[in-house]
Amino acid sequence: MNQKPKAFSKKQNGIKHKKGFPKSSIIILVIIINAIIIAVTAFLIPIFVNTQNSVQSTIESLARNYYENYLYENLNTVRTTSDSAAFEETMQKYQEYGFGTVHLRQILQYNKQENHTPSIDVADYCDENETVIKFYPEPPYNRTTYRMELTYSCNF
């Protein structure tokens, strides 16, 4: 009475059928799952890249605003109250080494005081103390002639 189950369950028209899924069904299922994974990945990668680009672009914009409207203005005050040649000489030194490192926290604080609200809350993505910017003035040492080095510490 206790017989072991046989590998074949039914016999129809002289053909034996195995229990379970046929191999072709399993292959089709694997192909469908892979297609879904590829589609989801293809959808998420642009979102990730766009977020990263948006955050970096926002930080660069905030940093430009900080240099052009705060840092340069304070330096320009020194220029108008002292010898222009001495100002140029000082700026030449900073051209090589740059001004002190400015943390994202400082730039965000300045923009908050000036009521500049960025389109993205970069603090949600980047460490305010580890994301830093260094400014290097370039001749002829005016508001828009400088370069920035940005070091991002962000999780995207």
Image: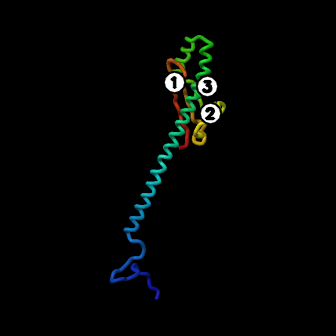
For mark 1, what is the residue?
146
Residue most extreme to the left: 14
Q: Nearer the viewer, residue 30 or 140?
A: 140
Of the residues under marks 1 and 3, which one precedes in the sequence?
Answer: 3
Q: CA distance from mark 1 to mark 3?
A: 14 Å
Dot 2 amino acid type: His
**Residue holding disc 2:** 116
Where residue 8 appears, x then y in whole percent?
A: 39, 79
Q: Amino acid at mark 1?
A: Tyr
Q: Quadrant of residue 33?
A: bottom left
Q: Which residue is at the front of the view, 114 or 86? A: 114
Alpha carbons under labels 2 and 1: distance apart: 22 Å
Q: Secondary structure at mark 1?
A: strand
Instruction: Give the class, few, some or many, for how many residues have Cα within 10 Å of label 2's Cα (few <14, many ≥20).
Output: few
Q: Earlier in the sequence, mark 2 or mark 1?
A: 2
- Between circles 2 and 3, the one closer to the viewer is 2
10 Å crowding of disc 3: few (<14), some (14-19), many (20+): some
Residue 94, percent from left and from top: 54, 20
User: Residue at 57% across / 35% down in the picture?
Assistant: 131
- Kindly identify the residue that appears in the image at 41 percent across and 71 percent down: 21
Position of 51 with respect to 4 (left or right) is right
Q: Of tags 2 and 1, which is closer to the observer?
A: 2
Question: Disc 3 on helix, strand or loop?
Answer: helix
